[in-house]
Image (cartoon, helix red, strand yellow):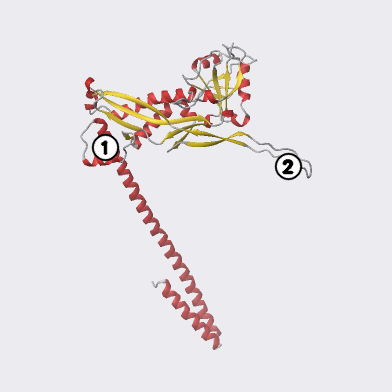
Amino acid sequence: MKKVDELRQDLTGIKEEVRSLLNENKVKDAEAKMEEARSLEKKINMQVELDEQEERELDTKMKEGKGGKMENREQDQAAEYRNAFLSMVRGKDLSTEEKRSLTSGTASSGGYTVPQSFHKKLIDKLTDLNIMRKLGTIINTDSDMDIPIVVSHGSAAWTAEEGAFSESDDSFGQITIKAYKLTRIIKVSEELLQDSAFDLESYLVGEFARSLAKAEENAFVIGDGVDKPTGVFVSAETGVTTASGSAITADELIDLFYSLPRAYREKAVFVANDTTVKAIRKLKDSDGNYLWEKGLSGEPASILGKQIHTSEFAPEIALSANVIAFGDFSYYKIADRKTRVFSRLNELYSANGQVGFRGYQRVDAVLTLPESVKTLKMASA
């Protein structure tokens, strides 16, 4: 098949023939040549379209090939790092390649960043074990983050014809999310480490996740912000104060519900201690019906149509205590620094036939919009 350039040359020749025939008044012959020219133009357009499509497909294949190679290379590097990391954890002699691979994950403060697969398992378990990670919003950061917040909203005003517009601006503030350090050391006997059947990775993930999740939830619920995150029960606004310092009424729960602005009620849930939940389960409305609604198909139980979650760290019923939080917890931001760091301690516990494993993470959390969560506070007397 002729190339497009050659076909265009043929078309030019035919058009010249048409002009010559018309000059000689050979109209019928000219019309026949014009039909031939139109047919050739269609052929050229089809060929151009086919050539462009072929070029696009070739370009796509080349990009996919490069992308696939890059993706495979990244997967290979991740697998190499994970294998070297686990060899280091078990105390095996590392090959030159493994040592080289580990250097890519060396943390500035010592130790090694955990492999992606290890990290994902740890995060999944943290989320399973820490109720606040399920309710809050997780963000990943590389450094301290300033989050702008609206301190007060402006308002509109009715204005007379040709009257002056009133000025009413939003007032903005700022919250800085930092990174507090949460640490743990786990000791494992040398005999277990030498047992090839012992799933060391799963054990370390499980142990670290359990202890980190417990410390996290404690801080995320009632943390005072001193060397740790600020808890949601601390920073939320008081919605209702009870009449009694030792008991909660059904009416007070309803008051708490409506103390939360309507904009936040759609996604709102309750959080309380088990002992508080036990007291709530006994409450009835004015018609004698229990406020408590049993959850179905694994869903949490609910009060006034809203789910209730429990945390062992939520304050128990006591004088002046904030015992229930109700609101949209998505405004509670949990900021994870992207890496967790891990190291093996060979000598520290060797006298006891043990090896230490030290791990840490850096995290902060804060309620960025206090009005989005309201608390029920017990009376002071």
Q: In the image, residue 242 lies at what x, y percent?
A: 61, 15
Front position in the image: 174 or 332: 174
Residue 186: numbered disc: none
At label 2, the amino acid type is: Phe
Front position in the image: 47 or 220: 220
Q: Quick one: quadrant of the C terminus?
A: top right
Vertical comparison of 342 with 78: above or below: above
At label 1, the amino acid type is: Ala
Instruction: Please identify the residue farthest to the bottom as the structure is shown.
Output: 24
* Numbered disc 1: secondary structure: helix
Instruction: Please identify the residue farthest to the right as the structure is shown.
Output: 161
Q: Quadrant of residue 63?
A: bottom left
Crowding near the residue tagged with mark 2, few <14, some 14–19, many ≥20 C-alpha atoms within 10 Å: few
Q: In the image, residue 80 lies at what x, y percent?
A: 28, 40
Q: In the image, residue 366 lies at what x, y percent?
A: 50, 29
Mark toward the start of the polypeptide (2 vs 1): 1
Camera-near label (2 vs 1) is: 2
Q: Which residue is mark 2?
A: 165
Name which residue lies at 51% across and 77% down: 35
* Numbered disc 2: secondary structure: loop
Crowding near the residue tagged with mark 1, few <14, some 14–19, many ≥20 C-alpha atoms within 10 Å: many
Q: Which residue is mark 1?
A: 84
Front position in the image: 250 or 103: 103
Label 2 and label 1: CA atoms lie apart by 68 Å
Q: In the image, residue 170 lies at what x, y percent?
A: 63, 37
